[in-house]
Each structure stands twice: as structure tokens, then as C-alpha cells.
Image (spheres, rainbow, N blue to C red):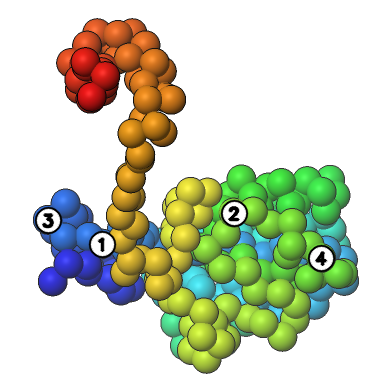
Amino acid sequence: MDVVTGPGNVFVATAKRLVKGVVGIDSEAGTTEIAILADATAQPGLVAADLISQAEHDPKAASVLVTDSDALAGAVRVELDRQAAATKHSVRVREALSGPQSGVVLVDDLEQGIAACNAYAAEHLEIMTADAAGVAGRIRSAGAIFVGDYSPVSLGDYCAGSNHVLPTSGTATFSSGLNVTTFLRAIQVVNYTRAALEEVSGHIVSLSGAEDLPAHGEAVTARFAGGS
């Protein structure tokens, strides 16, 4: 076995950490998280339902609303109370929603909201704004982006085909979800001619001298000793 991949709980993440370096792994994914970027056009009931859907996973799941609308934030709080009370895993959901990892981020405008989302780099990011597709095109850091009212995270979980193994805890700023490249290796092949090596040989000698590794440069100049 060369690569271990797949989602899981803290025990799966611990197992991956133990074998990391012996075999490849996709990531040490943390607890699930959702961020929703929403403006005054969003439907509070849908925003609340999607925040709850991720809070259902784990008491430490993160559910974050980023909005420039005070009115929407207030309406979503009302919906969260109503819907959380009615859902099966109400205790778990309420614990997740009330934890320090969850909350509402009020921003001045959509520009600031986009910046906040790029900084947070959520595992799952929903866009519920006017011109949601245009806004989604400006997101640079997220595991997966769900655009508009009819693309909830649950769609990605079960049906849409997007991968379920996604970067968490801000690692979307430098990594991607599980994809075909996870199973590929790039091998670099260097093949210079005599003339091509001679053309750059001076640079190699200079750099190897600067690093006090002269044998590196000598390995190049040896190829041209005596003009052979």
C-alpha cells in the first residue's frame, strides 16, 4: 500500500498521522466546518438549515455565517433556535453552534466578506448572495464551494460527485481536496546536451562556490577538461 486516503473521525486522523512518512496520506482532516457567505438576499431558513447540517456531525463542528446584513444575522439566529430544537441531534447541534468555533461574522460589505472567507479558508463554503456565481469566482481558498440556494453542502456529501475528503482548519490556503493528483507522482527528467551544459556551466560553478560546495562545480567542469 502506497497511499492511505479517506474521511473519518479523530481515530482515523490519528492512524494517518502514525503511518505518515511510511506511506503517503491525503491529509490529516479535522472536524468538519462550513462557512456561509450571505447578503440580504439570502433566505434565513436555508442558511440556518445548512449551518445545522454540519453542526450535526460533531460537537466541535464549525458553523460560521459571514454577512454584511444585520437583519439577516438576526433572522438566522431565530431560525437556528427553531430548527435546532426540532432536529434529531438537537443537543449535539446546539453544542456545536454555541462553541467558540462557530458564530456570525458581521462585515462592512461584500468585499470584506470575500476577504474574510479567503482568510478563513473553510472546508465547505456556501455562497448565498446576489450574483452567487460571480462571487464564487473570487474565492481563492476553500475546500469546496457551493453556489446559490440549490447547492447545499449535503448535495456534495451524497450526490454531486465533489470529493468528501477536503482540507480543514485553514489548510485550504495551501492544499486541495482529494483528487486524481493525490495518486500521481511527478518524476523530473533532466537531459542536456554537451553544448547546453557548457552554456550554463559558469552559473553552476559560481553557485556551487557561493555555497562552498566546489565539488559540485568540479563535477561539471570535469566534463570539459582537455576539450574532450
Tag 2 secondary structure: loop
Q: Amino acid at mark 3?
A: Val
Q: CA distance from mark 1 to mark 3?
A: 9 Å
Considering depth in this image, is 171 or 107 the residue closer to the camera? 171
How packed mark 4 is, by other alpha carbons closer than 10 Å (few <14, some 14-19, many 20 or more), is few
Return the residue at label 3.
22
Above-or-below relation of 89 to 92: below
Q: Amino acid at mark 1?
A: Ile
Sequence-earlier tag: 2 or 1:
1
How packed mark 2 is, by other alpha carbons closer than 10 Å (few <14, some 14-19, many 20 or more), is many
Tag 4 secondary structure: helix
The location of residue 30, given as percent across then percent down, is 36, 59
Q: Are marks 2 and 3 in contact (CB under 8 Å)?
A: no
Sequence-earlier tag: 2 or 4:
4
Q: Are marks 3 and 4 in contact (CB under 8 Å)?
A: no
Residue 67 can be seen in this image:
yes
How packed mark 3 is, by other alpha carbons closer than 10 Å (few <14, some 14-19, many 20 or more), is few
Above-or-below relation of 89 to 219: below
Return the residue at label 1.
25
Q: CA distance from mark 4 to mark 1?
A: 34 Å
Return the residue at label 2.
141
The residue located at (51%, 73%) in the rendering is 54
Q: Are marks 1 and 3 in contact (CB under 8 Å)?
A: no
Q: Is residue 184 left or right of residue 139?
A: left
